[in-house]
Image: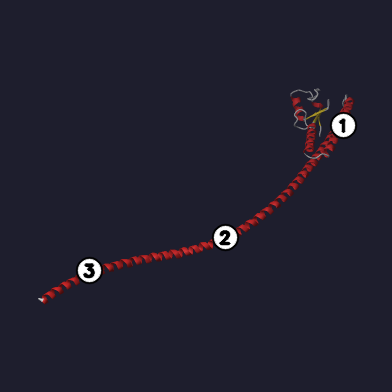
Amino acid sequence: MQLVSESVKTKQAHSFLLSEKQALARQLKQVNSSIESVKMRIGQSEEQIKVCLTDAVKFTQEDRHFMICLETAKWELADAEKEFKWLKSAAASSEKDYEQLQRKVDEFQMKLDKEQIWVSVAGTLTEMKCWSNIALLFIAYHSIMCAGISSRDSRGTGCYNGQQSQRKKLEEELDELNSKVAELSSETGETAIQKLQDEIKNCKNILKCGVCFDRPKEVVIVKCYHLFCNPCIQRNLEIRHRKCPGCGTAFGQNDVRFVKI
């Protein structure tokens, strides 16, 4: 009986130990699974730490590069400020030089304008003197023509006297013109030029035909000694309107003479 009871107790103890063993095995299995899970988490954490370290190293390098770039930019900015100050001073100096050059250019331009005015005045005076000489030649030639024609004309004496008075009148006008030239030669500027141009225009108008006011005088009517261009006189002869356009004196083809002015 004692052995049976001990055997039962032993079986019960064995069963209890087996159950304990199984429970411990289950706990061990759970512990192992937990360890594996922790190992996996540790591995993942290590990977994350590595990534973070890599990023940290990268950011550190970028920060260093950024600091280097910032220092370089500061130096470049300092150099740019120095260059800007130098350019500003150079611009101020160039502006002063430009103002001086502009003043010199203005002075030269004023001198050039004055020289041009004097050249224009001198040219106009020369042209005025040329027209005065032409007027003198015209007066002399006209007188010679009048004297030559009047010698063959029955009314030559009276015409010659009239021509002498006309010659004196033209000489007085020429003297007046020369005095105006002398007066204009003492003047300067646009007023003198305008006066000279007006006088030249008047002198040219004297030598132009009084009918068409375009072509120069080239023929003379010996009965009245008025001068016109040949086309105007020939037109009068063709339409049989044989009267002087200036005074209305009748004339014929034989009363027309060519003159050179």
Q: Quadrant of residue 192?
A: top right
The quadrant the C terminus occupies is top right
Q: Which residue is mark 3?
A: 23
Q: Nearer the viewer, residue 69 or 158?
A: 69
Q: Nearer the viewer, residue 106 or 247?
A: 106
Write the residue at 49% across / 62% down. 63
Write the residue at 63% across / 58% down. 83
Q: Earlier in the sequence, mark 2 or mark 3?
A: 3
Write the residue at 15% across / 73% down. 9
Q: Residue furthest front?
A: 2
Q: Quadrant of residue 110?
A: top right
Q: Is residue 19 visible?
A: yes
Q: Residues within 10 Å of mark 3 (few under 14, many from 20)?
A: few
Label disc, if present, on residue 33 of the rendered structure: none
Q: Which residue is mark 2?
A: 74
Of helix, strand and loop, which one carries label 2?
A: helix
Which kind of residue does numbered mark 3 sit on? Answer: Ala
Mark 1 vs mark 2, foreground winner is 2
Of helix, strand and loop, which one carries label 3?
A: helix
Q: Residues within 10 Å of mark 2 (few under 14, many from 20)?
A: few
Q: Residue furthest bottom?
A: 3
Q: Is residue 188 above or below residue 63?
A: above
Mark 2 vs mark 3, foreground winner is 3
Q: Which residue is mark 1?
A: 172
Residue 249: x and y in percent read: 81, 23
Total label count?
3
Of helix, strand and loop, which one carries label 1?
A: helix
Mark 3 vs mark 1, foreground winner is 3
Residue 108: x and y in percent read: 75, 48
Q: Earlier in the sequence, mark 1 or mark 2?
A: 2
Which kind of residue does numbered mark 1 sit on? Answer: Glu
